[in-house]
Amino acid sequence: MRSLWTLFGSSPFEPLVEHAKKVHECVAMVRPIAEAVITGDMDRLRELQHQMSKTEYEADLLKDQVRSKLPRRYFLPVDREDLAEFLRQMDRVADDAEDFAVVATFRPLNLPAELHQEFKDLVDKVVQVSEALLDVAEHLAQLQKEAFSGPGAQEVIDKIQQVCHMEWESDKLSRKLARHYYSMDMPPVTIMLLDKLCRALTSIADHAENVGKSLRLMILRK
């Protein structure tokens, strides 16, 4: 049986999945940017920042496409505001990834070697959070077909819990790294830039968790 949504309007869920994929493209670029930060390759950082800006713009275009499919006269299988919040939080994930790229271009960081692995660990965890979130988002079309209920919905809720746990792990890594670099004798500007980079990373994970919570709310309200 076709869902009521297919009778009353064009579905926003497939464009939402495409937007989530593009947002993850932004986050995935955090890894090569971090590598360039460590090596101090400013030319590479500027190139990556340009690519990030282009990808984030493409994500914005997809975001606008989703919003165009949320006219109030059409039926939605979930609360319209919950869906809009899901989109807003996903958009912030891409914004945070772009912030990371921009800050990385300010000046060479000269990151001490003893901080390299901890910095990489944090970056890897944040990208893993985004990967887990994309796995969740890719279930949206199926959730729509099942009216956001049933065994499939419970499976998504379980995956969302994994996203939340991984966000908690990223917070722990961030605090560990912060304790380390604040205890070191480094130029204040280096600490300031590193702190901005780490805040952008943790913000990616925070907003990814918020995306998951928005989807969980949609499911639980059914």
Image (cartoon, helix red, strand yellow):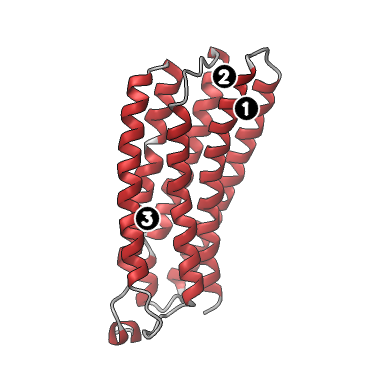
Residue 66 location, quadrant:
bottom left
Q: Considering depth in this image, is 137 or 51 the residue closer to the camera?
A: 51
Residue where numbered disc 3 is placed: 20
Examine the rendered structure and indicate whether residue 214 appears above or below residue 193.
Answer: below
Instruction: Give the image location of residue 205, x and y in percent.
Output: 53, 45
Contact between labelled residues 1 and 2, with CB atoms less than 8 Å apart: yes
Residue where numbered disc 1 is placed: 177
Task: Name which residue type carries label 3.
Answer: Ala
Task: Name which residue type carries label 2.
Answer: Leu
Left or right placement of residue 133 versus residue 199 in this view: left
Contact between labelled residues 1 and 3, with CB atoms less than 8 Å apart: no
Mark 3, other Cα within 10 Å: few <14 / some 14–19 / many ≥20: many
Residue where numbered disc 2 is placed: 115
Q: Secondary structure at mark 1?
A: helix
Whether residue 166 is visible: no
Residue 2 location, quadrant:
bottom left
